[in-house]
Image: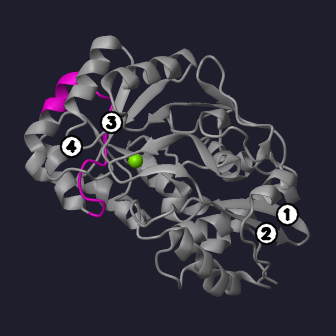
Amino acid sequence: MRLRTPFETSMDRLDVRRIILLEANVDGVTGWGECVAAEAPFYSPEYADTAWPVLRDFLWPMVKGRRFDSACEIWGLLKRVRGHNMAKACLEAAVWDAEARQRGIPLWKLLGGTREEIASGVSIGIKDSLDELVETVRKELAAGYQRIKIKIKPGKDLDQVRRLRQEFPRIKLMVDANSAYTLADFPLLKQLEGFYLMMIEQPLGWDDLYSHIELQKQMETPICLDECIHSAEQAHAAVELGACKIINIKMGRVGGHAMARHIHDICQQHDVPVWCGGMLETGIGRAHNIALSTLPNFSLPGDVTASKRYWAEDIITPEVTVSPQGTIRVPTGPGIAFEPRLDLIEKLTVRKERLV
Ligand code: MG
C-alpha cells in the first residue's frame, strides 16, 4: 500500500508498505491480525520476508489443531521459537479478535481495557526543510492531535526542535531518534533539555540498555524506550535499572497482546507510564492498537492516528477517525469492531497462502 506521504526516519525512507495480513479461522469464527514487520531489517532484525516463512513453517504447526481456552495461551504455544515477535503477534492478535467475536464482546473489553476514548498524537517523519516541518506540525495541530513527535537524526535535531519551540511554545512535543546517537553525543542530547520535551525516545543503541541507564542518570528529560524493549524481562530490567522513565509499547515488537499487557502491568507497578507506538499499520493493525491503548496505564497520547493520515483508502470500514479534540472513540462492536474490506484487500494482494 502506498503511503500518502513518504515517511523518513533515521533508519530509512519509505513510500510503499508491504504488509502481511493473517485471517484465522478459529472454530468457524474469523479473526484478523496484521504483521507490522517492515520491508527491511532496519528497525528490527525481523522483516516481512522472515515473518512469512516463520509463520508458515513454525508458528502455524504449533497451533494447528490445538485446543486452547483463550488467546492468552497462544504465547506459550509459540515460545519454542525464539524472537520473531512480529510474526507471533500477528497470529496471536488474529486469535484474540476471533475470541472476542465468539464471545460477542469488543476486544478491548476482553483485554481488560477501561477507556472509552484514547488520546491521539502524531509521529512526523524527517522533513527536507524547517519550513516544511513547521507547516506539517501546524496542519496536525489544526486536525486536533494532542502531541507532536518528530523523528530526528544527527544534523536534523537541535535546529528542528528550536524552531518548533519558537513557533509552538506550549505544545506537547517529543523527539524519536530510532537509535541514531551514542553516548559520545551526550553534549548534543543535553542541549535538547532546554526545550522542555515530554521525552526523548530511543536515542541510543537499539539493544543497549546500559548506555540508556548512563544517559538517563544525567538527564532530567525522561527517556522513553522503544526498540530496546522486546520482552517482559527487558522491560523489567529497564525500569528497575533506570534506563528510562517511559516505555513505548508496540504489540508487534513484544509478541502480541498478552505480552504487551504483561509489560503494561510491570510498568504500572513501577509508576512508569506507557503509550502505544505505531508501525505504519493499515486499519487492522490500527484497530488492534486502539484496543490495546484502552488499558489503564496507557496514560500518554500514542501514535495511533486517523486512517487518512497514512492511506488514501484504508482496508477497514469504517475508517479510523480522530475528533477535533484529538481523541479516537473506542468502538463497541465485537472483536476489533472494524470490518476488513475484503474486495479492496483482494485487489491489493500480491501473494496469498492458505494453511490447513
Ligand atoms: Mg520509536
Is 236 left, or right, of 73 in this rendering?
left
Disc 3 residue type? Val
On the image, numbered disc 2 is attached to which residue? 24
Estimate the spatial distance between the alpha carbons at disc 3 and disc 2, rounded to whole Å: 37 Å
Label 4 Cα crowd, 10 Å radius (few <14 / some 14-19 / many 20+) = few
Estimate the spatial distance between the alpha carbons at disc 4 and disc 2, rounded to whole Å: 43 Å
Residue 36 visible: yes
Q: Earlier in the sequence, mark 2 or mark 1?
A: 2
On the image, numbered disc 3 is attached to which residue? 175
Q: Earlier in the sequence, mark 4 or mark 1?
A: 1
Q: Earlier in the sequence, mark 4 or mark 2?
A: 2
Q: Earlier in the sequence, mark 1 or mark 3?
A: 1
Estimate the spatial distance between the alpha carbons at disc 1 and disc 3, rounded to whole Å: 39 Å
Given contact means CB atoms under 8 Å apart, are the residues at marks 2 and 1 in contact?
yes
Label 2 Cα crowd, 10 Å radius (few <14 / some 14-19 / many 20+) = many
At mark 4, the secondary structure is loop
Disc 4 residue type? Pro
